[in-house]
Image: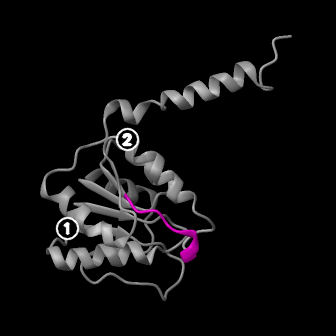
Amino acid sequence: MIFATVGHELRFDRLIKGLDDWAFASGNNDIFAQIAELGDNGYSPRNFEWQSFLDPDTFKSNFEKADLIVAHAGMGTIITALTMKKPLLIMPRKGDLKETRNDHQIATAEQFAKRSGIYVAEDEVALGPLLDKLTANPAPTISEAASQFAEPELIKTIRDFIYNGKAYDNS
């Protein structure tokens, strides 16, 4: 099963419509999506089941059952996928399309694309072919190492700041 989620604050119609178009073209309707509760005039998928809002237990249950997570590049979803070691396909929201306040999700997607088990579709055009690839064979899961440890560069940067920066005072 594919579980799609766009967070609870903002709709992400471009992602949901791209997924709906792919579901129709591929015939794959083993998809359930959480599409955000704000606004009644957004896109409603026709080729898979969906709800606007999921309570935390239902969200967790869908996440656990899923073979693949499709989502925006939100940190909550990314952290949950890392924790549960679920393969994750992210499509970042874009600031110039007024899907978010800036392009922070593009930067997030670029950083996490380097991790095993995380895949990035830059836009809805790239979404379908990547879904085809990930559903043709079981998508590799997020590795144990990738789910538990920070990148060595991040650890070094934090250590350097703590020991050499203003945050460290050995007096």
Does label 1 or label 2 sit earlier along the sequence? 1
Image coordinates for residue 71, horizontal then vertical, percent: 40, 61
In the image, taking residue 30 as reference, residue 150 lies left or right, namely: right
Q: Is residue 92 magenta?
A: yes
Q: Position of residue 48 (x, y in %)?
A: 25, 76
Determine which residue is flagged by label 2: 115
Asked if 130 appears above or below 151 in the picture, the reply is below
Q: Position of residue 73 (x, y in %)?
A: 47, 57
Which residue corresponds to mark 1? Answer: 30
Residue at 86% over, 10% down: 171
Q: Nearer the viewer, residue 138 or 59?
A: 138
Relative placement, left or right, of 26 versus 81 is: left
Question: Is residue 66 in sight in this rendering?
Answer: no
Closer to the camera in the image, 9 or 117? 117
Residue found at the far bottom of this picture: 41
SS for dot 2: loop
Q: Is residue 134 left or right of residue 40?
A: left
Binning the other alpha carbons within 10 Å of mark 1 as few (below 14), some (14 to 19) or many (20 upward) gives few
Q: Is residue 13 above or below residue 154?
A: below
- Quadrant of the drawing holding the N terminus: bottom left
Identify the residue at image location x=26%, y=79%.
21
In the depicted structure, whether residue 102 falls above or below residue 118: below
Q: How many marks?
A: 2
Drawn side of residue 13 relative to residue 69, left or right: right
Q: Which range of residues does the magenta coloring cover?
A: 90-98
CB within 8 Å, label 1 to label 2: no
